[in-house]
Image (cartoon, rainbow, N blue to C red):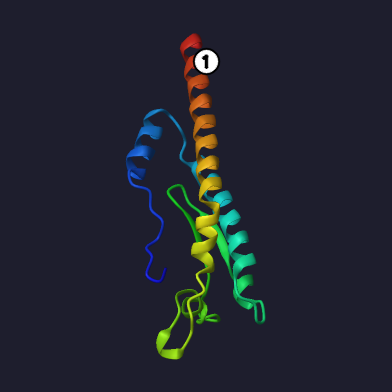
Amino acid sequence: MAGKPAVKFNGAAEFRAKLQQMGVDLKDFKTINKLIAENVAGDARSRAPRDSGTLAGDIRGGGTKTRAYVSVGRKKIPYAGPIHFGWPARNIQAQPFLYEAIDSRADDVREVYAKRVDELAMRTRTNASIKGIRG
């Protein structure tokens, strides 16, 4: 699993453009993306190897209008990458806890996105109908 690229959805930019054309405020996706990232981060924390617990405690999720992300490691925790990806020269085996968390949550992520997109589409249709009646 070492070297696996970030999870990316093809057509995401076009999808967001269509949503904007429908009148959907993409700020709603910041909340959705953050929720998804926090769920994956929680799963990753439970899978992270434990010594002192510092590594697991540093796993955090966040979201913007265009992406959900989970991150771990910083200057105080420089070993996050080598633990996750491994470091053969130092005899460190890869322990891909982040990738495992993403893989285990894939169905949940799809379900949340599908549900939220349906809700946004329904709300947009309702708002368009109301505007049409009043206009």
User: Which quarter of the rendering shows the N terminus?
Assistant: bottom left
Numbered disc 1: secondary structure: helix
Against 107, residue 123 (above or below) is: above
Specify the farthest residue to the bottom. 90
| 59 w.r.t. 135: above or below | below
Q: In which quarter of the image is residue 42?
A: bottom right
Q: Observer-nearest residue: 51 or 125?
A: 51
Give the left or right position of residue 88, taking residue 114 as reference: left
* Residue type at numbered disc 1: Ile
Q: Position of residue 85 (x, y in %)?
A: 45, 75
Most foreground residue, 53 or 29: 53
Q: Which residue is drawn at 48% across and 28% down?
A: 121
Q: Position of residue 68 (x, y in %)?
A: 48, 53
The mark tally for this picture is 1
Where does the image place residue 69, in percent across and percent down from the top left? 49, 58
As drawn, which residue projects farthest toward the right?
52
Residue 44: name its quadrant: bottom right
| Residue 115 falls in image quadrant | top right
Residue under pointer 1: 130
Q: Where is residue 112 in the image (x, y as percent from the top left)?
A: 55, 41
- Vertical comparison of 37 with 95: above or below: above
What residue sits 51% from the left and 80% below the top?
Answer: 75
* Label 1 Cα crowd, 10 Å radius (few <14 / some 14-19 / many 20+): few
Question: What residue is at 55 percent from the left and 59 percent from the top?
Answer: 61
